[in-house]
Image: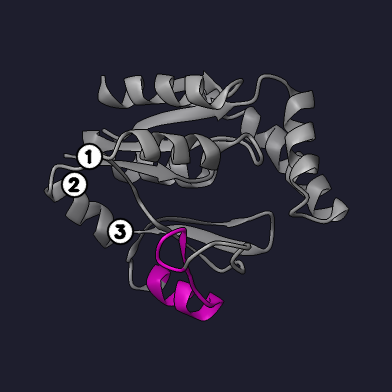
Amino acid sequence: MSSRLTVIAGPTAVGKGTVVAHILAHHPEIKLSVSATTRQPRPGEVDGKNYFFLTHENFDQLIEAGDMLEYATVHGTNKYGTPKQPIIDALARNEQIILEIDIQGARQVKAAMPDAKLIFIAPPSWEELVRRLTGRGTESAEEQAQRLVTAREELAAQSEFDYVVINDEVARCASEVVDLIQA
């Protein structure tokens, strides 16, 4: 049942969201699981579409009820996680589901659903990852420094994944990911 579940993870600023958006735009048969987070929405993000934006209290209530497939505190501040029931429902409908989550979450999903495919999106180089993070301008210098520390740890985890795909060019990377999902 969970073999139709694909986890996409990788370090901060590697372009996971851009790759996933490309896949969804060109493959309507593939669905994205909507994650929950306690962080504030970024410009243009819509509650229930990009994320379920929750208070820390609401998020903790879901954890305590056992209603999260995976969750983590990311960059030491905000919680992110995947509500369990929408995944179960989608798999029951035989849908192909993508989870775009962090490394800790990928480990939790693999433990809970061992048939899930884990795909690691990697940058072409460390220098390119740093350029992408600093170039997007959505974090302070302090947050960027913390994210780069985390990114080094995340890059070291790629051997835990079933597949590693380099995001050197979005369309090419997305195409390779889709081939792996549909294999």
Could you give the CA–CA distance between mark 2 and mark 3, rounded to whole angstroms? 11 Å
Question: Which residue lies at the image location 32% right of the left edge and 66% below the top edge?
Answer: 67
> Is the C-beta separation of discs 3 and 1 under 8 Å?
no
**Magenta part of the chain:** 47-63
* Of 173 and 73, the residue lying toward us: 173
| SS for dot 1 | helix
Using the image, tell me which numbered label, if any, was put on residue 146: none
Amino acid type, residue under disc 2 in the picture: Leu
- Percent coordinates x, y for residue 36 in the rendering: 45, 63
Is residue 49 located in the magenta-colored stretch of the structure?
Answer: yes
Using the image, tell me which numbered label, if any, was put on residue 2: 1
In the rendered structure, which disc, 3 or 1, sits on the residue that comes first in sequence?
1
The relative height of residue 22 versus residue 183 in the rendered view (above or below) is: below
Q: Give the labeled residue for mark 3.
A: 84
> Is the C-beta separation of discs 2 and 1 under 8 Å?
yes
Could you give the CA–CA distance between mark 2 and mark 1, rounded to whole angstroms? 7 Å
Question: Which residue lies at the image location 70% right of the left edge and 42% below the top edge?
Answer: 150
Q: Quadrant of residue 8?
A: top left
- Percent coordinates x, y for residue 154 in the rendering: 63, 35
Q: Give the labeled residue for mark 2.
A: 91
Is residue 141 located in the magenta-colored stretch of the structure?
Answer: no
Q: From the viewer's perspective, is 57 left or right of 175?
A: right
Q: Residue furthest right?
A: 141
Which corner quadrant holds the C terminus? top left
Could you give the CA–CA distance between mark 3 and mark 1, rounded to whole angstroms? 12 Å
Q: From the viewer's perspective, is 8 left or right of 27?
A: right
Dot in front, 2 or 1: 2
- Percent coordinates x, y for residue 93 in the rendering: 12, 48
Is the residue marked by circle 2 packed among few (<14), some (14-19), or many (20+) residues within 10 Å?
some
Amino acid type, residue under disc 3 in the picture: Lys
In the rendered structure, which disc, 2 or 1, sits on the residue that comes first in sequence?
1
